[in-house]
Amino acid sequence: MDEIDKKLTSILRKNGRASYTEMARQVSLTEGAVRRRVGALVSSGDIRRFSAVLASEARAIVLAKLDPKVAAAAIASIKQAAPDIFETSGAYDLAILLDAESVEEINKKVDRIRAVKGVASTDTLMKLA
């Protein structure tokens, strides 16, 4: 990824709806060149998805301790409900990012995670503002 690609991804982070023409003007390239570069960033996996983030959505981080004997299976099960998972070191084995339309939906997702065989305990950190 060169400096122009970094600038394009920065523009898209700030405004995922930025047009190719708008981005081209900001990086001094043609619209076609920007379109090809963004396409290449998607193909290479540098851009994984375009998404809308709603102002009313609820967010949380679930910290989970796992039984080491079944950790791999537990992680596979959790990934089905929550694809954003980070392995951690220290007191917890996983940090799981949850997004939902409401706190109630977050609570349902946390309950599903707690029900996974091998999840020994969880702590939930809810975004308040």
Image (cartoon, rainbow, N blue to C red):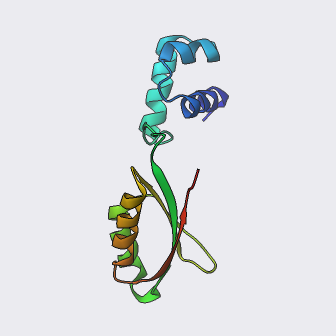
Of 24 and 55, nearer the camera is 55
Image: 23 above or below 55: above
In the picture, the quarter occupied by the N terminus is: top right
Name the residue at 42% across, 40% down.
49
* Residue at the image position 46 percent from the left and 20 percent from the top: 35
Place of residue 44 in the rendered image (x, y in percent of width and height, measured from the top left): 46, 39
Q: Of 100 and 29, which appears nearest the observer?
A: 100
Count of numbered circles in the view: 0
Q: Residue furthest right?
A: 3
The percent position of residue 40, horizontal first and vertical second, equals 46, 31
Task: Examine the image and state in which quarter residue 128 appears.
Answer: bottom right
Residue 2 lies, in percent from the top left, at 64, 32
When the figure is inspected, residue 11 is found, relative to residue 55, above or below; the finding is: above
Between 87 and 1, the one lying in front of the other is 87
Dividing the picture into quadrants, the one containing residue 89 is bottom right
Residue 46 versus residue 96: which sits nearer the camera? 96
Q: Residue at x 54, y 10 (%)?
A: 30
Does residue 49 lie above or below 61 as drawn? above
Image spot of residue 36 (x, y percent): 46, 22
